[in-house]
Image (cartoon, grey):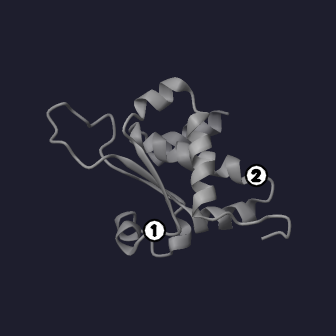
């Protein structure tokens, strides 16, 4: 990591994610009612296995829950939907990117995982990003 970049701890990374969420359009935040956002250093082995990865540095975030396209009022009350951001892989990507700020990267990962909450696939999101 460059000398002018200081790696934030979990609390500071949570504050960045909280700010990023607060800056999203109101309509988007309303669709995230009840969505919990967590920050931890790395994905656990079960999460890595569930997404088909071995290296914890390969996963910057994950959505856990039932996406909005599959939710129904008849569903039993499940555990809350959540987005988990992984601090260490995000920091590694930030150091490798160079030109992007940490706030921008955290926002990108957060929005990507919220996209899964909305029912979008990785391919859907890549197509949307390519339109920019």
79 with respect to 41 (left or right) = left
The residue at which mark 2 appears reads as 100
Q: Are marks 1 and 2 in contact (CB under 8 Å)?
A: no
Dividing the picture into quarters, in which one does residue 44 lie? Answer: bottom left
Number of other residues with Cα within 10 Å of mark 1, as a class: few under 14, some 14 to 19, many 20 or more: many
Residue at left 62%, top 45%? 107
Estimate the x, y position of residue 126 in percent, counting from the top left: 56, 44
Dividing the picture into quarters, in which one does residue 117 lie? Answer: top left
Q: Secondary structure at mark 1?
A: loop
* Furthest residue toward front: 11
Residue at left 62%, top 61%? 90
* Furthest residue toward top: 27
Between 71 and 23, the residue placed more toward the observer is: 23
Q: Which mark is residue 43?
A: 1
Residue at left 54%, top 47%? 110
Between 9 and 70, the residue placed more toward the observer is: 9
Number of other residues with Cα within 10 Å of mark 2, as a class: few under 14, some 14 to 19, many 20 or more: few
Estimate the x, y position of residue 38 in percent, counting from the top left: 47, 55
Residue at left 69%, top 47%? 104
27 with respect to 2 (left or right) = left
Q: Secondary structure at mark 2?
A: loop
Q: Quadrant of the C terminus?
A: top right
């Amino acid at each position: 990591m460059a000398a002018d970049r200081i790696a934030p701890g979990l609390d500071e990374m949570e504050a960045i994610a909280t700010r990023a969420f607060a800056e999203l359009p109101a309509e988007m935040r309303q669709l995230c009612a009840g969505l919990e956002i967590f920050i931890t250093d790395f994905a656990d082995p079960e999460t890595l296995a569930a997404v088909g990865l071995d290296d914890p540095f390969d996963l910057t975030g994950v959505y856990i829950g039932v996406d909005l396209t599959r939710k129904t009022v008849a569903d039993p009350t499940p555990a809350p939907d959540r987005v988990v951001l992984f601090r260490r892989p995000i920091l590694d990507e930030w150091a490798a990117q160079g030109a992007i700020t940490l706030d921008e990267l955290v926002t990108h990962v957060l929005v990507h995982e919220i996209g899964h909450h909305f029912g979008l696939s990785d391919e859907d999101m890549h197509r949307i990003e390519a339109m920019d």
